[in-house]
Amino acid sequence: MRIPSETEVSDTMDEGIRHQDHTDVLASESPSRISDTPPQRVRDMGDLVRIAGSIAAIAVVVLIAIYLRGVTQGIEYDVHTASQALDWLYDVPTALLQQFTTVVVVLSVLFHLLITREWLQSITSSIALFCGYGATWVVSNLIVHSGNATIISALSPSVVLSGAALLPDLYAGIGAFLSAAGPRRMRASVKWGWNILYATAIIVVALSANAISGVLISFFIGRIVGLGIRFIAGTQNKGAWGSSIVQALQSIGITVKALKAVEMQSAATPFGTAPSLQDDLVDGSRLYEVLSSENKSYTVSVLDSQKYTAGYLMQLWQWVKFSGVAMRRDRSVKDTTQHHFAMLLGLRNIGLSTVKPYGVAESGESSILVLESDAALVSRDLTKLSDEEARDLLRYLDRAIERGFTNRSITPDSIAVDGKRNWFIAGWQNGDFGSSSANESVDRVQLLTLLACTMGIDRAMSLTREVWGDDILIALIPFLQKVAVPAQTRALPGWDKHLLAELRTQLRSLASDEMTDAIEPVTLSRFNLRSFVALLLLVVAVVVVLTQLNLQQIIYAISHADPWMAVLCFISGIFAWIGSGISLGAFMDSDKRNYLGIFMSQVAASFTAVSMPSGVGPAFVNLQFLRKSGYRNTIATAIMSAVVAVQFLTTFILLIVIGIFTGRNSFSSMIPTNTLAIVLGVVAIAASVAMAIAPLRKLLIDKLLPIIASYARQLLDMLTQPKQLAISALGALLQSLAFGLSFWAALKAFGYPTNVLETTFIFLLANTLGSAVPTPGGLGAVEAALTFGFSSLGVPTAVALSATLLFRVATYWLRIPLGALAMKWLNAHNLV
């Protein structure tokens, strides 16, 4: 290591260390030669997080003030009641109290900033004070000129002072000032300033001079302004620099002879610098070369609290993004440094190469990791890896995983060689020990894909099979997903969108068909297609409920219904679940027939019905349930299609039979005569055009036709099993009759008795036509069809409408929460 000359040290001392008076004193008293840069101002990502939190808090306060007005009034009343014990407060002029708070807080904080020579901080704090006042004035005028009486009333105090704005500007101005002068943990004057401001707010609210909602919004506006200015200007780094590092190293047995800052390489990262292999790829650290009095060299990694927020946010993002895989969330630099130190010690204890840990020290806002220097540490070009070097890396990871250590982020930068030419994996800061099998598999996937990108798939597979074995590789199939591969690996020239698919194909070729079928996919990402569809269904369901549910009509109908008949209406609907469950379970193998799971899947279908067209939701749930029950896609689709076909045919035959025995001829007036011909004609034209285009014809014949043929064979097998077909038809019959009985009970609840069979006939016909409309659950169309169908047959329109509403509450709206609970149960048991 090159030691700086006396001239260099002197020049650096003149330019940098003079910015820290305490460093000047200690450096003059210490024989240590210190070459350090001046402390830099830092833009703390935590300020942006706090700004986002303040914006969200304003939205919450406004919503509460508008829609929970009673809550805010109750809180204000409690404050006023409590203040009656302090009657003397009413003798205090409010304006004088506010002026006193402003003068005391501003002068004390500015005095503190000036005596500590933080000139820029004092300037930005003063600017924030005026901006806070201005922001409140602007927001107040915007609200007043909007003319929204509801918001104005919610934010107005009960006692309006002469000339007072809608929002009190004191809290925004002083709040912005204190936010820009902070953080409070570093300055006692800022901490006491906040306490005084809080006390003033409580007193003024108690005097009814300000509304509590207006005070809170003013506070948050001030926070947004102050934090925004503080982030733009940056805050003084309060971490360990120069002689502070020397003192910290002295506490762990290192007497510093020379200390020199290492220039960090710039990079497009949240920290602005690239991580260094010398401190095991610590993000956002500052590096120093240290020579002790015993002429031993050390690498010192300093991690500052103010820069660590970005690292913590990255950890949180990983934790949110991954599902079923543990991710670290170290809330402080002390936690992350101590954990990193323990990881390095553990790896070296089991005989694996790493950077050489010496100790950990703390100083102010910084945590210090001390390592024994190894100038021979270098990264390597992975495209030049030999087979034996690749085997060394595979054995290294295998040994670490064998003892429970996982890295969590194996990237091209992680591969290095030490002074003894040992290949090893670096970057264990966010790794862990005692890891789960899922984390171990993700580590293996990351190294496998990294080698495949740099060495080629065939070569990488050959080497990994040799070192890890087929059983381990087969177990990686569910984890071979894009989300598990770091972005740095995906940026390599050897990466393409087909690489994972090719790896997956080769891994599947190692297993038998039975073993491949038994492999269940693992959900690693919270933001996959499945979660997106679930969220979309939830949003659609909420929109449908809010826009289509006419509470007044429903409440009127239910309040005038016979309660016993209403209960029978709901219970009959439950039997429909049992019937559809029998229809599905009939085609399932006995060893895969989970009766409770089948019933819960039918209940869960009621939840999807609120966001999907009628019939689509149950088919979707049935298909997912069959897949989770161990059926391959083709067979699962065939079973689901067989169930739909049986239910359709059963309903059609039931309509004909009841129509013959009851004499009803409603088909002629309710079914469009040309619809079937039009549909068949469109299908025929589309098929003819597709077959006339040679490339498309070849694609359909080569790709689509085998799938259709396989599906058709499976469906034919299902429909040619007399016993299963009869049981499924019995279940579909029970489902139809249960719905018919449910609507009969709904009519009876309003004192209109009808024939059960006739009611079932009209219900099935009207419900089938209404369900054909592609709205969620046939909303609107089903209600209209049922009301029109029964009123056209002599049922009074009011009774028909009331019975329809009661029926839909019992068999549609009440099923939504039950279906959501069933869906949650199925997810918990991995059945959907």
Image (tube, grey):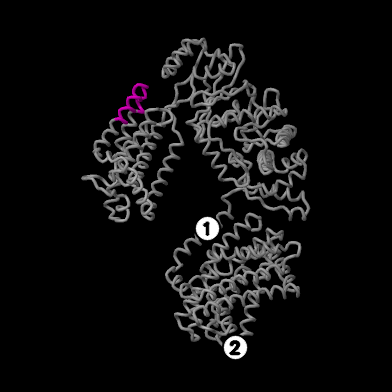
Q: Is residue 374 above or below residue 66?
A: above
**Residue 817: x percent and y percent?**
54, 62
Q: Is residue 110 magenta?
A: yes
Instruction: Give the amino acid type for the residue marked by disc 1 in the picture.
Output: Leu
Q: Is residue 578 above or below residue 130?
A: below
Q: Is residue 598 magenta?
A: no
Residue 566 versus residue 80: which sits nearer the camera?
80
Drawn side of residue 563 relative to residue 508, left or right: left
Q: Which residue is mark 1?
A: 536
Q: How many marks?
A: 2
Residue 217 versus residue 745: which sits nearer the camera?
745
Residue 104 visible (yes or no): yes
Mark 1 or mark 2: whose residue is earlier in sequence:
1
Image quadrant where residue 647 sits: bottom right
Drawn side of residue 237 relative to residue 621, left or right: left
**Residue 394: x percent and y percent?**
72, 36
Examine the residues drawn in magenta and state their main secondary structure: helix
Instruction: Give the amino acid type for the residue marked by disc 2 in the picture.
Output: Thr
Residue 672 versus residue 757: which sits nearer the camera?
757
Q: Residue at x 54, y 75 (%)?
A: 564
Judging from the image, what secondary structure is the residue with disc 2 in? helix
User: Residue farthest to the bottom?
Assistant: 663
Q: Which residues are magenta?
A: 104-121
Mark 1 or 2: in front is 2
Quarter in which the N terminus is drawn: top right
Q: Which residue is mark 2?
A: 662
Residue 642 visible (yes or no): no
Q: Is residue 24 above or below residue 708?
A: above
Crowding near the residue tagged with mark 1, few <14, some 14–19, many ≥20 C-alpha atoms within 10 Å: few
